[in-house]
Amino acid sequence: MLKGFKDFLLRGNVVDLAVAVVVGAAFTAVVTAFTSAFLKPLIQVFSGGGEFAGSFVVSGVVFDYASFINALITFVLTAAVIYFLVVMPLKVVEERRRRGEEEGPADPSDVELLIEIRDLLKAQARPVPGDGRDGRDGRDDAGGAGGRIPQQDR
């Protein structure tokens, strides 16, 4: 059960999604700060300025329409940037791949796979001092044979 969960977490899609959420949250904060610092004051100036600029009062209750317009502009800007900087370029690349103009990610060749397997096997077979495969048993004695006693044929 835990192995399946680990495999799920380590899949590329989950990691990519986590990165996208973090970057998206940071970008949203930037757009929100921009609209709050520049656009909302502009809305308030164009609506007459003063204490209740960008809002109106009904029976003592303040309706802040400038904040709503600000949030709407934030949403539209965020959606536009995501569309033009992420969705549209990915569609263009996908369309090129479909037409055969651009290759997708290349699969490793048989030779590359065999080289990788060979290197992994070499790394596993490489003697590590003190593990018994290097002719020493890990002791620092000067036994001449690396601490091994030769076996006699029986």
Image: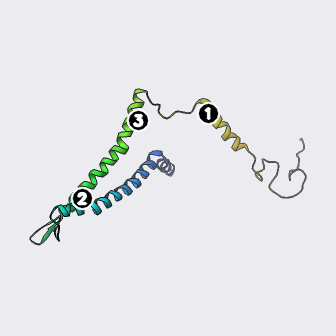
In the displayed orientation, state which residue is furthest to the top.
100
Mark 2 to mark 3 CA distance (whole Å): 34 Å
Residue 112's disc number: 1
Image-quadrant location for residue 124: top right
Secondary structure category for the residue under label 3: helix
Name the residue at 87% across, 58% down: 141
Question: Residue 2 at what x, y percent from top left?
Answer: 50, 52
Foreground residue, 152 or 72?
72
For label 2, count other residues whose C-alpha is less than 10 Å away and answer few (under 14), some (14-19) or many (20+).
many
**Residue beneath label 3, please?**
93
Q: Are marks 1 and 3 in contact (CB under 8 Å)?
A: no
- Name the quadrant of the C terminus: top right
Q: Is residue 149 left or right of residue 5?
A: right
Secondary structure category for the residue under label 1: helix
Name the residue at 47% across, 31% down: 103
Residue 105 vs 80, above or below: the answer is: above
The residue type indicated by label 2 comes to Asn
Question: Residue 101 at what x, y percent from top left?
Answer: 43, 28
Mark 2 to mark 1 CA distance (whole Å): 55 Å
Q: Is residue 67 left or right of residue 154?
A: left
